[in-house]
Each structure stands twice: as C-alpha cells, then as structure tokens.
Amino acid sequence: MPKEFTLKMKIIFFILVIFSSVDLLANESYVERWTMSNGLECSITFDSSHELRLSTHWDGNGDPPIKISEAKKIVSDWVANEYQGKVSEEIVRYSLSSYRAEGFKTNQWLYNISFVKFRGGEPDPDFNENIVVLMDGSTLSKRCRIKGT
C-alpha cells in the first residue's frame, strides 16, 4: 500500500476513535459526585449501556424487584469481594430513588446506599463510601480521579 493511503487510514481511524469517545462521555450521567479527603474526585455514573442491559424494570407500584434486605446483602457481598475480606461495612444511609439518566427512555429505580468501612474494627481513613444497587441486582460503584484531570 502507498504510504499516503496508510496515513489517511490512520487519520480516519483516529478521528473515529475521538468521535466515539465523545459520544460515550456525552451519554454518562452522574448519580452522585463527591471529593474525598485525599483530594480525589469520585463519582458514580450511569450511562446508556446500563439501560440497554437492564431487563428488570419496575414502575414504582407494588414491591420493588429487589427488597432493601437483598440490596444490603448485595452490598455486603460486594464489599467482601472488592476488599478481599479485609474490610467490613456498616450501612448508615439508604434510599430508593427513581432516576433517569440523560438519553434514557424510562426511569430506572435504584438503591443508593452509603456505608462506613472498617479495618480491624477501626474506621478506614476514607471511611465513607457509596454504592448503587440496580433492580437487576447489579451494582454501580465509584470511580475516582485526581482533581482537575
């Protein structure tokens, strides 16, 4: 292949990657955002891929597909797996909320659960943590980054 053709293909590929990334970022909505004591910016986000894979919809009438006791168990299992048994948790706040991310056709119900992490019976340095439990039993957890990046 001529070098000119290869260069054009690379440029086209690069432009497509950039536009794809912009589209993915544009469909991301924040469920919650906060800054940790060490300066990291953290968030829990919902994006259009979640709506595509969610099969469990609830209209807010009757009992939710997942009871709060089941959501708490999901959080305990997540903590045990995420921290390999080195951390325990105490749930301090939870809410059942209807949430519609930008671009979604319907509202999604979710549990937003806050808990305190303990290591060896003592609160962890960054002890507050949040997790979202969706009505299909899947979770959304925090993603953190250095402030300003």
Image (cartoon, helix red, strand yellow):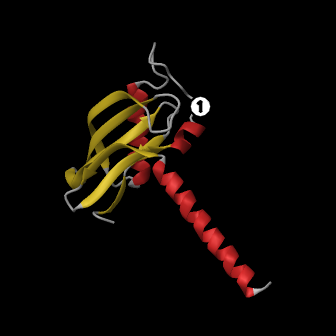
Rendered view: 120 above or below 97: below
Identity of the residue drawn at 44% across and 50% down: 81
Q: Quadrant of residue 149?
A: bottom left
| Image side of residue 79 versus residue 26, left or right | left
Q: Quadrant of residue 84?
A: bottom left
Q: Quadrant of residue 131?
A: top left
Rendered view: 29 above or below 119: above
The secondary structure type at the circle numbered 1 is: loop
Q: Quick check: can you spot residue 118?
A: no
Q: Position of residue 146 (x, y in %)?
A: 30, 65
Q: Dividing the image into 4 quarters, which one contains the N terminus?
A: bottom right
Identity of the residue drawn at 74% across and 80% down: 5
Rendered view: 118 above or below 51: below
Tell which residue pokes out farthest to the right in this image. 1
Q: Amino acid at mark 1?
A: Ser
Q: Position of residue 111 (x, y in %)?
A: 38, 32
Q: Position of residue 16 (x, y in %)?
A: 61, 63
Using the image as rendered, state which of residue 25 and residue 87 is in the foreground.
25
Using the image as rendered, state which of residue 141 and residue 147 is in the foreground.
147
| Image side of residue 27 versus residue 44, left or right | right
Count all numbered tags in the image, as a single digit. 1
| Image side of residue 63 versus residue 123, left or right | right
Using the image as rendered, state which of residue 126 and residue 89 is in the foreground.
126
Q: Which residue is mark 1?
A: 55
Q: Position of residue 45 (x, y in %)?
A: 41, 46
